[in-house]
Image (cartoon, grey):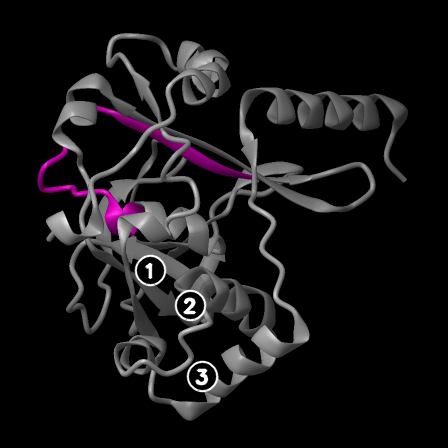
Amino acid sequence: MIAPLDQLRTQITGLLLNFLFIPAPEITLDQQKTAACEEIFLSGIGFDKLRAGGVQNTITAVDYLIFLKSKKQFLFHGYNDMEINALTPRTQENYRGQKITAVFASGDPIWAMFFAILDRGKYIGSVRNGSYLFTSPSGMHERYYFISINKKMEKDEPWRRGAVYVLPMSTFYPTHAGNLRFDEWASDEPVKPEEKIEILPSEFPFIGQIAVHNDKEPMYLSWLKYRRRIKSKPYRALDDSELL
């Protein structure tokens, strides 16, 4: 049983998340879409090849990724390189800023989509983002997002085609626990993707809800101003046809 003080803290955390950030989009797969996604999965051909051939064109990349998350329990890794055969551990910072040598992934395919389309070769300065997984007092899992690029990159349009790699969970462990956490996972071993799905910037559900911050401002200001910024000046990316 949750102590009253802990329950109050959890309730306040939920209110703050809802005030500062944006909730996960409502993406519902009906019975027909679920069956179509299952058919794609069982075919073994791959979503990208079927899409290129004009098959299953009623199923979007987001639909299929949500299906893989909810029905098949995969993890996801977004990257610009679209020809990776295996992901190998490399030294990088986890959500706490600690350096570890690992392959990183997330249980959140939408967050992975952001890292797929962000042009890392072009990007200069800070990018501020997060996918927060919150467990409410009722036990429900809720997701909240915060995405902000810096002013210089707003002008340069730092977007490109990328890929979300679908990864088996077997060697991964969560890097964070608790009622509020990043849905971040790490593997100390190389990981071979089960599938690769091409992502275009226009397919990212939050492409119009990306804020623009000053690199010199403290993080808390970026949080406090996030919803106001995306409301007053919705972000628009380049047309997909102009991108790599």
Cβ atoms under marks 1 and 3 closer than 8 Å: no
Who is closer to the viewer here, 3 or 197?
197
Location of residue 172 by image quarter: bottom left
Mark 2 crowd level (few <14, some 14–19, many ≥20, 10 Å Cα): some
Residue 4, placed above or below residue 117:
above
Mark 1 crowd level (few <14, some 14–19, many ≥20, 10 Å Cα): some
User: What residue is drawn where x is 36% and y is 9%?
Assistant: 218
Question: How much space separates mark 1 and mark 3, taking CA atoms?
Answer: 30 Å
Q: Nearer the viewer, mark 3 or mark 2?
A: 3
Left or right of 227 in this view: 77: left
The x, y position of residue 86, in whole percent, is: 22, 71
**Disc number placed over residue 188 in the picture, else none:** 1
N-terminal of the pair, mark 1 or mark 3, is: 3
Task: State the residue position of label 2.
Answer: 171
Give the magenta range. 115-132
Cβ atoms under marks 1 and 2 closer than 8 Å: yes
Question: How much space separates mark 3 and mark 2, taking CA atoms?
Answer: 25 Å
The answer, for residue 125, to whether it is visible in the render is no
Who is closer to the viewer here, 96 or 110?
110
Left or right of 37 in this view: 155: left
Residue 94, placed above or below residue 243:
above
Q: Secondary structure at mark 3?
A: helix
Task: State the residue position of label 3.
Answer: 40
Who is closer to the viewer here, 219 or 52?
52
Mark 3 crowd level (few <14, some 14–19, many ≥20, 10 Å Cα): some
Residue 131 part of the magenta-drawn span: yes
N-terminal of the pair, mark 3 or mark 2, is: 3
**Amino acid type of the residue tagged 1 in the rendering:** Asp
User: What residue is drawn where x is 50% and y is 47%?
Assistant: 183
**Amino acid type of the residue tagged 3 in the rendering:** Ile
User: What residue is drawn where x is 22% and y is 56%?
Assistant: 162
